[in-house]
Amino acid sequence: MSTTIGVDAARDELTGFTGELIGTHDPSYEEAQKVFNAFIQKRPSLLAHPNTPADVALAIGFARRHELPLAVRGGGHNGAGLGTVDGGMVIDLRKFKSVNVDPSAQIVKVGGGSLWGEVDKATNEVGMATPSGIISTTGVGGLTLGGGIGHLSRKCGLSIDNLLEAELVLADGRQVTTNREQDPDLFWAIRGGGGNYGVVTSFTFGLHP
């Protein structure tokens, strides 16, 4: 099938999608398709900004049915431009921005589109932190799934060492939770294995004083 399917077809088909669908002719396209590295000049044919994990599942299903190359954008910092794609679909998680700190349990639950600066601000307010990168605008998702080295790593380990749980949408649309007890093979894979295991919509990290 064609990899240039338009946004009108997506809007007609994805009637249950509650987020935003952006095509190449929409006024917001040029700004929406940008990633952090201006040297990356890929042109996706469709950008999906989901509001919920159910929206993510719908977007994945659409890409599969139409054989569209699929990229997932968290913070958009990936140096190789893996957060975007030519002619395919980008699932942009920028609306998944929640950061919920539980000081008594020493954990923080973070939306998959959050940036590390947002996490640091929230955890620092209660005198805690979790290992992150060294640039505040880096996305939580990309850094974590790649390992996550930062200023606290010598004392507290990598980001993946502090990951306690993740919520994902898999390629078949299933929404799953994974940790050391629940689907441990998937939990092992996402801690440093990079992409292609699913779209992570939330991360739960342990915190340190």
Image: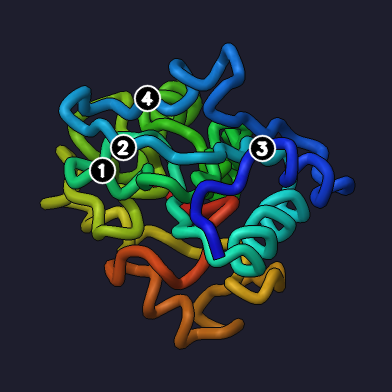
> Contact (CB < 8 A) between labels 3 and 2?
no
What residue did someone put label 2 on?
42
Q: Residue 7 in the image: x percent, y percent? A: 66, 37
Could you tell me which residue is drawn at 49 percent across and 34 percent down? Answer: 114
- CA gap, disc 3 to disc 1? 22 Å
What residue did someone put label 3 on?
7
192 left or right of 170 in image: left
Q: Earlier in the sequence, mark 3 or mark 1?
A: 3
Mark 4 or 2, closer to the camera: 2
Could you tell me which residue is drawn at 59 percent across and 31 percent down? Answer: 23
- CA gap, disc 4 to disc 1? 10 Å
Kind of residue sitting beneath label 1:
Gly
Q: Is residue 209 visible?
A: no
What residue did someone put label 1 on?
81
Q: Nearer the viewer, residue 172 or 13?
A: 13
What residue did someone put label 4 on?
34
> Contact (CB < 8 A) between labels 2 and 1?
yes
Q: How many marks?
A: 4
